Image: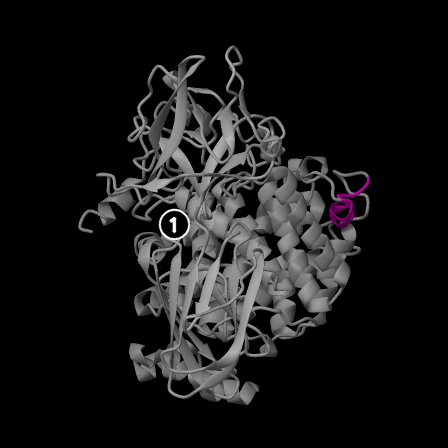
Amino acid sequence: MKNRLRRCGTLHGMQRQFGPGGRSRIRSGCAALVFGMAGLAAGAQSNRVVAVRDRLQPLAAGAVTIGGYLGNKMDLCINNRIVLQPAAPFLRIFKTKNLDPGGYWGEFIGKWATAAALACRYQSNPALTGKANTAMQELIHAPAENGYISTYNASDAFKVWDIWIQKYVLLGLIAQYDEAGDLQYLRAAQRSADYLLSKTGPGKMSLEEYGPPFHKGGVNFSILEPIVLLYQRTGDKRYLKYAEYIVASWSKPGKYAPKGVRLIENAEAGLPLVQYEVHHAYALMSNFEGLCELYRATGNKRYLDACIKFAEAVEKYELMITGTVCNHEMWYNGALAQTGVLEQPNETCATVTWMKLCYQLLRLTGNPRWADAMERSLYNGLLGAMMPRGEWWAYHSQLNGQRMPSRVQGCDISCCVSSGPRGLLITPEWMAMKMPNDALAVNLYSAGKITHQLKNGASVQLTEATTYPAGGNIRFTVQTQRPVTFPLQLRIPDWSKKTKLTVNGKPVTAAPGGYVTLHRVWEQGDRIELELDMRGRIVHAPSGTDQAVVRGPVVLAMDSRLVPEQDTAIWLIGGARKFEPFPGNPKYRSLDPAHDFDSQKEDVYIDLRPVDVPDKNIWMAFEVPFTDRPIFHIHREKRILMCDYASAGNQWSETNLYRVWLPQPMYMGNMYARNTWKLLGYGMKAPMKVPAYITEALKDK
């Protein structure tokens, strides 16, 4: 294999030989022999040292093309964030090594490198490929103690945030290696990891003791993920042994947790997340991401079961309606607390990490419930945190208040601005996936094309026409040079209770909450028509009488551009809910006991009417039926405009306020929380603005 690799050279070298347009030819030629060549982290697992093959695997690079609203957002993120971001500020601190040990800014280069690799895997971008290669070359040739790539001098190694930074250094190098096939990156990652192994572990420095004390080892434990990835790519059992040492240490007494952090045991017991020793949402989910990789490497079923139980606890106790988690970055019993005005809710880093954990579980289990979860986060919390042109992101995202751009932490950026693109750019990886039996699973619907290569060499393309989730009609057209046989699996979301599906005009049953499998001989021009149930739904808050309106995967919100404050109180009208027909009882109830307001837990359908609004920055808007009651026996219907959550407040200003949860009744005179930016920015005197270097770069766009 080594000799064959030498003959092939790196992908960058072959691109210089064949030119930028030769990328597809290179991928189908000798570069396909390079370890890890076929894709990020999930990749072509035949080249990986694993005990368990994923049930669902990403398609080849460039096999998914996304158009429409979602494709536009991805293009904006790539062109206005990833491409425009200068790498020099990231690299400077690795050269000078003068970062204060309390700083974590060294993570930014790894996050950017990972996002750049995902972007280039999605669509060929020679300029970005070259920029990433230059940055990686500078990184691996920065001064290093025995190969250890750090922002700190040797005297500060492994203290506070150093191992957290090391995690992202390794993830960035591995991602670029997987995408570019350059063995320099893998070797540099190994040298850096080897130095860590030489200083920490059994009989050496305790891994957890040197992280931030408040995090009780959770920050340092997250090195688990790249350590296992190195094992999968090299077969070096030292990495596997070190990974198992990390997981074993969770159950042992530690400096900050006398009984151990007991992550697996807590997950198995189904504990609420606030009862874990590791309270930081982002760090704890990162630990379980690593445990997913360790299951993939070892086949130890206990690891996978614990990850599933953990994710189920996140959904039950912490997940907010927009697919987001945390307050002050910590577990907060967020499912119950989300209807209030939270100080610093829904960190973008946490949203991204939740989506990445769901992506792991989708790959490992093949269960589409995790695609349901990612879709909700994607269209609400994630896209809501990205500014309309994709140039910057929010740090925290309110459910009632205003949007504010993230503050700058260091290196002219922040953790969340560098994290957001990683969540968005995994979308092509899970939108359509393959199975070992040649099945193609479509997990997310968007205008575009999907190319599926079968084991026998045949290729089939699905062209998808849809405005989903603005509309519920999805049409696939099959394009193939000759008849091909394979199973096509279409995800039917759990909320789509009434779904219509036809193949060449013939109806097919499609139950919610799973895949419908179409196993047949596919021929040129075959057509699949899917109509999802896009009825509006009233969702009842777990904590009380507040309600929200949802349509498909999209949460709706009131926005001050569409709904000014006014002196009236309103109630939502939906399904069987009515006022009792006798006077003197002001309580809003249903005549149908099955839908009693006080005990209602299931969704109630509500009549939504789509409308066009003048503001072109608002993607979707609907007339929603409410009623007000000036006198107890007079009920007047009012149709009020609500828009999709991602569009709500997207002027990112103090004058553009929004809210999701609606108390019943809701007094509209003070319906929007004001000055919430003061809760987001550590004593700031004014709301944060996008840095000047970004606005300058976008002047001509």
Rendering quarter of residue 26: bottom left
**In this rendering, position of residue 404 left or right of residue 183:** left
Quadrant occupied by the N terminus: bottom right
Q: Identify the residue at horizontal 65%, vertical 35% (top origin).
A: 214
Mark 1 highlights which residue? 89
- Asked whether residue 97 is in view, the answer is no
- Asked whether residue 354 is in view, the answer is yes
Q: Identify the residue at horizontal 56%, vertical 25% (top origin).
A: 545
**In this rendering, position of residue 174 left or right of residue 294:** left
Query: In this picture, which residue range is highlighted in magenta?
Result: 259-269
Percent x, y of residue 670: 39, 17
Give the colouring mode of the picture.
Answer: one colour
Percent x, y of residue 565: 33, 20
Rendering quarter of residue 61: bottom left
Q: Tag 1's secondary structure?
A: helix
**In this rendering, position of residue 615 left or right of residue 271:** left
Task: Please tell me which residue lies in front, 69 or 160.
Answer: 69
Q: Residue furthest front?
A: 582
